[in-house]
Amino acid sequence: MKIALAFSGGLDTSVCLKILQEEYNAEVVTVAGVVGQDPEKLEKIRKKAENLGSVKYYGVDLTKEFVEDYIFPSIKANGNYEGYPLSSALARYPIAAKVVEIAQKEDCSAIAHGCTGKGNDQFRFDTTISLKDPDMEIIAPVREKNLDRNWEIQYAKENDIPVPVDVNEPYSIDENIWGRSIEGGELEDPKNEPPEEIYKLTQSPSEAPDEPRTLEIEFENGVPVKLNGNEKDGASLIENLNKSVGEYGVGRIDIVEDRSLGLKSRENYEAPAALALTEAHKALEQLVLTRDEIKFKTMVDGLWSELAYRGLWFDPLREDLDAFIEKTQERVTGQVKIKLEPGSIRVVSRASPHSLHEPELVSFEDYGFDQRESVGAIKFQALQGKSYWKKKKDR
Ligand code: ARG
């Protein structure tokens, strides 16, 4: 039996690699991907995979694809689930899709992953695999054998699996170019304030520069293309923003999140660039879309975010929603300025050739239309309400 394993080199997937060989008697092809992290990491993971007996290893840099095919659509959709900018969630899809592609190429009969049976990632992996290749068997050793961390550490020691150095760290951390997720340890109790040590992308606001800083982001059809007037590819623009926004202590998120299974889970995130780009993007949409477009799009964005969160990226509904979102983004072109001050971010300027804002109509100084005409609109707005109040008084 030949199995393709989504492999990160961490404890879960290292244990899985061994179990698949021992208990399934399988030849294991390992697949690792980076989504914004240093591509050199892929060589370190290769060594681990080969030392643990993987027959073939694929290390793929998925950063560009992640940015253009997943993050850009999420910016257009103001992607956000209960306050979470979907950073870890979105990254699972290009990885899962790549594993399916390699499994097919390598003639594997099954795909394995290290997801637990408690989290959201199992929804994302399983659903992506089953939608892309319904005949592919899915093996999830951690879930199937109900494994826990202590059992895994013990098993690793007994089977000469090098236990990763961070295994004593209390936190479970997942990181990519769109954000960083921190769970576990004392954070599991929503009552405990997150200690400063969990943060890496953001400074404490008390350490932020005193001088405010203004950044200009230029959007073209809903996608950021320039930062401070300089043309940037998506990945470097996001990396740049992570740095400058994080320096001001902006981008920390602390929420209780409803997982797909319904479990409430305390989550901490750092997502400086995601926060800044979403705020800027929304400000531009306010300028160029009509009030009813914004109202409807807010519902579409919410549904879109839920699909992305719940493992349903490749569901047909996501494509349908994207068709609507894409159409609205034809006008989302222009410049937005955001002002950074210690611990805060604020949109202070927006401009677009498609702006629906007409200064001569709205100005206090110059009335572009005859004020007297508004009376009728107000009168009719109150029509049904008047009948209601009349009846109520009669009763
Ligand atoms: N709750 C988030 C999600 O489901 C983040 C999970 C991140 N995983 C982690 N090991 N910290 O997308």
Image: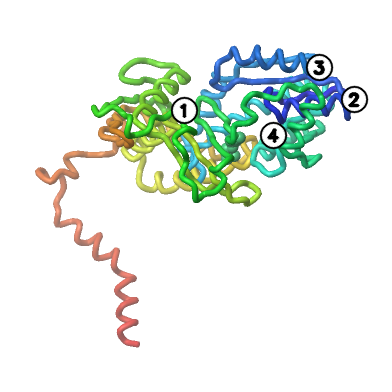
The quarter of the picture where residue 330 lies is top left
Residue 373 placement (x, y as % from top left): 18, 56
The answer, for residue 319, to whether it is visible in the render is no
* Residue 99 visible in the current orientation: yes
The quadrant in which the C terminus is found is bottom left
Mark before the other along the chain sequence, 4 or 3: 3
Q: Is mark 1 within 8 Å of ligand 1?
A: no
Q: Can you tell which of label 3 and label 2 is closer to the viewer?
A: 3
- Residue type, numbered disc 2: Asn
User: Looking at the image, is 350 positioned above or below residue 64?
Assistant: below
In the displayed orientation, state which residue is furthest to the bottom: 395
Q: Position of residue 298 (x, y in %)?
A: 44, 45
Callouts 1 and 2 close, C-beta under 8 Å: no
Mark 2 lies on residue? 25
Q: Looking at the image, is mark 4 or mark 1 earlier in the sequence?
A: 4
Assign a secondary structure to mark 2. loop
- Type of amino acid under label 4: Phe
State the mark number for residue 200: 1
Compute the Cα span from label 4 to label 3: 24 Å
Q: Nearer the viewer, residue 126 or 208?
A: 208
Q: Are marks 4 and 1 in contact (CB under 8 Å)?
A: no
Q: Which mark is residue 125?
A: 4
Q: Is residue 330 left or right of residue 152?
A: left
Q: Are marks 4 and 3 in contact (CB under 8 Å)?
A: no
First in sequence: mark 4 or mark 2? 2
Q: Please report whichever mark, 1 or 2, sits nearer to the chain's N-terminal start.
A: 2
Can you tell which mark lies on residue 53? Answer: 3
The reply to whether the C-beta atoms of the residues labelled 1 and 3 are less than 8 Å apart is no
Question: How far separated are the C-alphas under marks 4 and 1?
Answer: 27 Å
- What is the crowding at mark 1: few (fewer than 14 residues within 10 Å), some, or many (at least 20)? few
